[in-house]
Image (spheres, grey):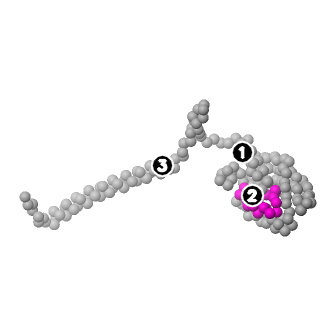
Amino acid sequence: MIRKIERTWFEIWGTEEAQNRFLKGLLAFMVCLVAVESVALVCLAVRHPMVIAVSRDATKVLTASVPESELLQNEARRVVTAYLNLSHTWEWQSIDNNMTAAAKLVGKDYSRKFIQSNSDQIKLAKNKHLSQRFHISGLDIDDKAHVARVTGDRILMVDSLRAVNSLTLEIGYEVESRTTDNPEGVYIVSETNLTK
């Protein structure tokens, strides 16, 4: 019943070595398994989700398509109109808010120039209690040159006095990536007053 308790050192060493070989094999298997799972998880994470549209008539997988030129032109028209309404229509009390909102529609390269050019206008409007309205009468967009030519009437108001003059602007824009602040992806990059 009682086994031999005393063993020589090489017998013990052989048993430990066999156990270590088994543990190394198990460790190599686990590393391979984790590597395969990691690759599979990365592949699943990078894959684009499938969007399915359900309507009364059909169920279809939605695919991204290149927008038509008319759609891009309408987006450019919306952004230019919003930019003009923010940067050229303001009350002296809220001019800072309008210019901050208009700066979100301005391209990165033009933003510093936009802020500098409007800082004098903001100071003058607050000191003199000036208000301005801009009514657009014409808006022509050239898709190829990325330029919008805007004509309209600018009304300056000081207390109860009003001064009206016509204004023609050439606004350059560029199409970049869409963001939450600018979902159209159209950014204003230049503004030139063509009125003589």
Please rate how many residues cluster around mark 3, counting C-alpha atoms within 10 Å: few if below 14, some from 14 to 19, many from 20. few
At x 91%, y 58%, the residue is 162
Name the residue located 75 percent from the left edge and 61 percent from the top edge. Answer: 97
Q: Residue furthest left?
A: 1
Could you tell me which residue is drawn at 48 percent across and 48 percent down?
44
Q: Tell me the quadrant of the picture where the N terminus can be found.
A: bottom left
Under mark 2, the amino acid is: Ala
- Residue 24 is left or right of residue 179, and the answer is left
Residue position marked by numbered label 3 in the rendering: 43
| Mark closer to the chain start, 2 or 3 | 3
Residue 7 location, x and y as percent?
A: 12, 64
- Give me the C-alpha separation between circle 2 and circle 3: 40 Å
Characterize the local packing of mark 1: few (<14), some (14-19) or many (20 or more) Cα atoms within 10 angstroms. Answer: some
Q: Is residue 8 magenta?
A: no
Q: Which residue is mark 1?
A: 72
Q: Tag on residue 102?
A: 2
Secondary structure found at label 2? helix
Q: Nearer the viewer, residue 100 or 3?
A: 100
Between disc 2 and disc 3, the foreground one is 2
Q: Secondary structure at mark 1?
A: helix
76 relative position to 47: left or right: right
Q: Bounds of the magenta span?
A: 87-106
Residue type (three-letter) at the residue carrying disc 1: Leu
Please provide percent x and percent y for residue 13.
19, 64
Which numbered disc, 1 or 3, marks the residue that appears first in the sequence? 3
